[in-house]
Image (cartoon, helix red, strand yellow):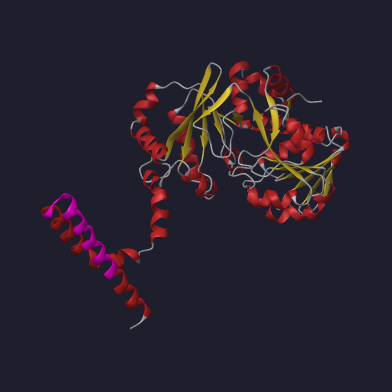
Amino acid sequence: MNHRARSRRTVLAAAFGVAFATGLTLTQLAGVPLGLVVTLLLVSAAPFTPRVAAADWHRFWVWWRLQTHPLGKGTALASTNAIWPLLRRLLRPDFVWVTYPGVEEHKRAYMPPWVERLLRPVFPTGLMRFGRYWGMIVSSLATADALEASPIRLRALLDEIARQFPTVPVALAGRLPSIAASMGVGLSAPFVHGDRGTVCAMAAAAREAASILGRDPTQVEIAVVGSKGFIGSRLVANLATEFRGVIALDSRYERTWEYEHGVVHTNRPEDLRSAGVVFVLTPRGTDINSLAPYIATGAIVADDTHPEIPASLRSQIEARGATLLKATLGDERFRFVPPIPDFRADDIPGCILEVLVLLQRGSDVLESQEAFNRVAQELGFRARLAPHRNRTEPLPGALASRARRSPDARATALSAH
């Protein structure tokens, strides 16, 4: 008799033993009829016990948790989606933010698989509040990669958003403006490009990084990883007027060359070694896996990716003696409801900053980056370099003592120096 057969007979014998013992106990405590009924039920179920015991329960619980973990959020999402055509006519948001699914982990934080199958191509996911202004968050079912692979699908998404919200400013999250620009898909009203707000916020965060190093920007060489993108190219041009030198790093460059104002365009990771500040603007935080060995000891690394740089890669970078922080806008007047994965509730993405300034001061603020920066400062917006929201490891000592002073100790004005 092999081991499997012996094990099955052992489980079966134990099941019958439990059945008779349970029946006998109930006979004594509650009477013969109930004891007989329970005994018969348990005995009839006993032959299935070995099969139940041999089942892959780990896989079952993984599947069950996937279906039910975000059950409340998923049910709310499905319910809102069902009445969305009616709800959209009743609500009158001041602005709209269009997002897209990130990695599977982010999607499953609020959307079980069964909910995904019920959703429309564009569906509501949350609200935003800023003073007397309030906005809606809507999402595409298609990922950024899927939209990048299909201009027709991207155009259909933008047309649907414009049809649903023709009269309010619409901000596009993450890679969407860059994808539209690379495909030659124009972004006219109601869409805003978002580059003014993002460049404003990231330039201010870059100045704060120089401050953490205890140096003036004119004494710091800064690197922008992802510099050929829609935002990256504009940020490089802005930083070149303030910093000693800019290393514009992007694997899409075919060669290395130096431009005016001390900007070096390069595809060589080893050029990062001279940068005191490194700004990461790649589509995903994991895109810089191969760059970690080239980041200088003592450098400040500012993460502006979503999905953000994962904890394992952050540890690898900080093991080299660098400090890694999340670059955001922080404003207590702003709230996401519900919070977005890897964002604080009061984080403002740069593209939404552009909308908020536009709502309060009109389209004239978009005439130049300098004009936008000046108005954003007047309105009280601040950039923030802060630990990642899901960070469990302690910050380096000097920075930790500064961060303890206040929740916004790493915030700085948006004005240009």
Q: Residue at x 70, y 26 (%)?
A: 406
* Residue 344, image quadrant: top right
Q: Residue at x 74, y 48 (%)?
A: 318
Q: How many marks?
A: 0
Can residue 28 be found in the magenta stretch?
A: yes
Q: In the rendered view, tell whether residue 274 sits above or below residue 72.
A: below
Q: Does residue 137 appear anywhere in the picture? A: yes
x, y percentage for residue 366?
66, 24
Query: Mainly helix, strand or loop, the magenta region?
Result: helix
Q: In the rendered view, tell whether residue 233 sits above or below residue 256.
A: above
x, y percentage for residue 43?
19, 64
x, y percentage for residue 375?
70, 19
Stretch of the chain drawn in magenta? 13-32
* Residue 86, image quadrant: top left
* Residue 188, image quadrant: top right
Q: Which residue is farthest bottom?
A: 1
> Split into 4 quadrants, where in the image is the N terminus?
bottom left
Give the left or right position of residue 24, taking residue 91 as reference.
Answer: left
Q: Nearer the viewer, residue 299 or 88?
A: 299
Q: Which residue is farthest front?
A: 28
Give the left or right position of residue 356, taking residue 413 as reference.
Answer: left
Q: In the rendered view, tell whether residue 183 sits above or below residue 27.
A: above
Q: Which residue is farthest left?
A: 33
Q: Nearer the viewer, residue 131 or 222?
A: 131
Q: Residue at x 71, y 53 (%)?
A: 316
Can residue 216 be found in the magenta stretch?
A: no
Q: In the rendered view, tell whether residue 229 sits above or below residue 411.
A: below
Q: Does residue 254 appear anywhere in the picture? A: no
Give the left or right position of residue 404, taking residue 102 as reference.
Answer: right
> Split into 4 quadrants, where in the image is the C terminus?
top right
x, y percentage for residue 214?
85, 34
